[in-house]
Amino acid sequence: MIKDYFQIRPRYDEVDQMGYVYHANHVSYCHQARTELLRKFKINDNELEVKGLMLPVISFNIKYKTPAKYDELLTIKTVLKGMPKVRMTFSFEIRNEQQQLVSHGDSEVVFVDKETRKPMMAPDFVLEALDGVSVLETVPEPNVN
């Protein structure tokens, strides 16, 4: 299991009329967190595309627990659940500054050939980058206000 933490402060344009982070932005935050986790293993969208691969999302399920607000420091815990084969599965927890659970969800992405758009096995360079990593946990910088 690979865990990573990503922090973000919602911008003013990301909140709705009620002053809460608009629900669709939770998905965007999770996408950013997933991208940063993979980047730590030198796996990024640019490299995938250059090598003729894409990594589309095929499912995303989310539950909202408590509202997040403008400029509130949010911490997103991302977990890669197991070694990829054709698919990679991630779980997410978004917590606010008081460590309250804001939302949680699961996402699944699939390796796809860029030309044929057909699913494919995870490429060797991805498997090699993740090989031998049984547990990696990065911790965010302490919140300094």
Image (cartoon, rainbow, N blue to C red):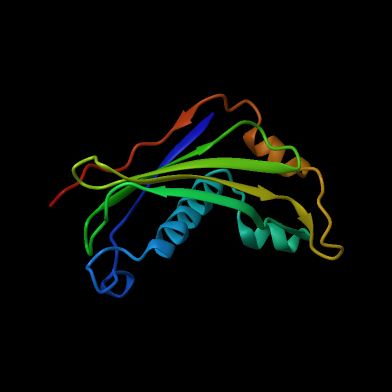
User: Which residue shows up at 32% across the image and 46% down it?
Assistant: 65
Height in image: 8 above or below 15?
above
- Residue at point 51%, 26% (across, down): 135
Q: As drawn, is 114 to the left or to the right of 55? A: right
In the image, residue 7 lies at what x, y percent? Answer: 33, 51
Report whether 29 appears left or right of 57.
left
Query: Most extreme residue toward the left, as rendered?
Result: 145
Q: Position of residue 103 (x, y in %)?
A: 37, 47
Residue located farthest toward the right when viewing the structure as drawn = 116
Q: Nearer the viewer, residue 98 or 142?
A: 98
How far across and how far down the image is residue 74, in percent? Answer: 29, 51
Quarter in which the N terminus is drawn: top right
- Taking 60 as reference, is 17 above or below it? below
Residue at image point 22% right, 42% down: 142
Look at the picture and state if 36 lies above or below 23: above
The total of numbered circles placed on residues is 0
Question: Relative to 64, is 115 above or below?
Answer: below
Residue plotted at (22% across, 57% down): 72
How far from the left and from the top, in percent, is residue 20? 26, 63
Residue 85 lies left or right of residue 62; in this view the side is right
